[in-house]
Amino acid sequence: MIKRILVAYDGSEHAERALKLAIDLAQQYAAEMQLLTVVPPLFLPTQSMALATSKLVDEANKQLENVFFDTLQKAEKKVKQEKPKLKVSVKFEHGRPEEKIVETAKSENFDIIVMGSRGLGRADYPLGSVSIKVADCAGCPVLIVK
């Protein structure tokens, strides 16, 4: 029985489709749903680090955090407007997305993880690296949505 659904959400097209499917599952099983957004570490090539000051890096991190937080807030608002009776919560984390998704699913005893097959990264792989790693490491079923 599905009682708790973790939705890994980054605002990508695939995440939007995963969210729609998760909403359907939550309704069918009268399950609660949590939207999880993870702000990934800022990646700067070594050559850029010589030019970047700590103030610039801090500013870029803050902007990245704001974008991801706004994306999460919009998704929560959308779910609550479309399905006001659905029990939905949100969680906002920092770190490697695949690690935080698996860690959250295990520590909070989710029955299933629903996520998009591709996130905001490279588009030349059939599955994103995050979805592959989550599917490999999760302690519960993972529904990967194309």
Image: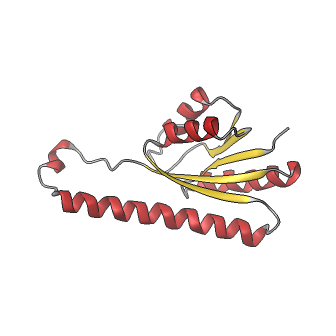
Q: How is the image coloured?
A: secondary structure
Give the side of residue 59 with respect to residue 71, left or right. Answer: left
Residue at the far front: name it.
107
Point 63% across, 35% down: residue: 106
The relative height of residue 131 versus residue 33 in the rendered view (above or below) is above
Q: Quadrant of the N terminus?
A: top right
Residue 88 position by quadrant: bottom right
Give the side of residue 51 with respect to residue 30, left or right. Answer: left
Judge whether residue 48 can be spotted in this image. yes
Residue at the far left: name it.
50
The relative height of residue 19 versus residue 83 in the rendered view (above or below) is above
Residue 84 position by quadrant: bottom right
Give the side of residue 6 with respect to residue 103, left or right. Answer: right
Residue 143 in picture, x, y percent from top left? 70, 39
Point 49% across, 63% down: residue: 69
Judge whether residue 145 can be spotted in this image. no
Residue 20 in picture, x, y percent from top left? 73, 56
Judging depth in this view, the residue of 22 and 80 nearest the camera is: 80
Point 35% across, 63% down: residue: 62
Residue 133 in picture, x, y percent from top left? 53, 31
Point 69% across, 38% down: residue: 109
Q: How many marks?
A: 0
Q: Quadrant of the C terminus?
A: top right
The relative height of residue 55 versus residue 123 in the rendered view (above or below) is below
Residue at the far bottom: name it.
81
Judging depth in this view, the residue of 107 and 136 nearest the camera is: 107
Residue 125 in picture, x, y percent from top left? 50, 37
Give the side of residue 66 with respect to residue 130, left or right. Answer: left
